[in-house]
Image (spheres, helix red, strand yellow):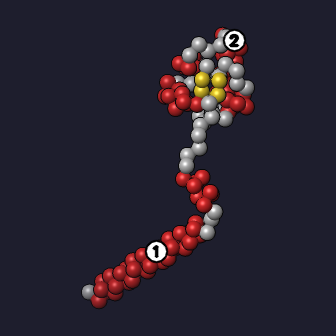
Amino acid sequence: MMYRTEVKRALGVLVIATFFFGGLSMIAAEKVLAGQPKATLQLQGQPQSPTVVNVNKATVEELIKVRGIGPVIAKRIIEHRDKNGMFKSIDDLTQVHGLSGNKLQRIKDQVTV
């Protein structure tokens, strides 16, 4: 019985210490962030605007800038374009191996024809 009481007391002290030191680390983090220039803080809170790329004119390097398109898919897009001609609509990209409907939905706002 005495052992249980000591364990409970030790756990209680541990919980209190965790809250105390956790709160101190949060206060320290706030002070560090407060010391940064305001422009930096504003940029961190704003999402980056996506790159819009014309898939009928883009190079591999330009296609890679689109979030969700890597070097392999970029090469496939260009190979498909060279073999079959220009894309008539964005939905034609589903003909490229590796560009499924789900991936197309994720990149649709970043590409144009």
- 45 left or right of 83? left
* Amino acid type indicated by mark 1: Gly
Q: Quadrant of the C terminus?
A: top right
Residue with the most extreme left position? 1
* Left or right: 92 as drawn, with respect to 19: right
**Residue 64 picture quarter:** top right
Marks 1 and 2, how far apart at CA? 61 Å
Q: Residues within 10 Å of mark 1 (few under 14, many from 20)?
A: few
Q: Quadrant of residue 62?
A: top right
Position of the N terminus by quadrant = bottom left
Q: Which residue is mark 1?
A: 23
Q: Earlier in the sequence, mark 1 or mark 2?
A: 1
User: The disc labelled 2 sits on which kind of residue?
Assistant: Lys
Residue density around tag 2, few if under 14, some if 14–19, many if 20 or more, within 10 Å: few
Q: Quadrant of residue 38?
A: bottom right
Q: Residue at x 60, y 23 (%)?
A: 112
Residue sitting at x 50%, y 71%: 26
Which residue is denoted by mark 2 in the rendering? 83
Q: Is residue 108 left or right of residue 17?
A: right
Q: Decide: marks 1, 2 in contact (CB < 8 A)? A: no
Task: Identify whether 25 is placed above or below 66.
Answer: below
The furthest residue to the front: 38
Q: Residue at x 56, y 20 (%)?
A: 90
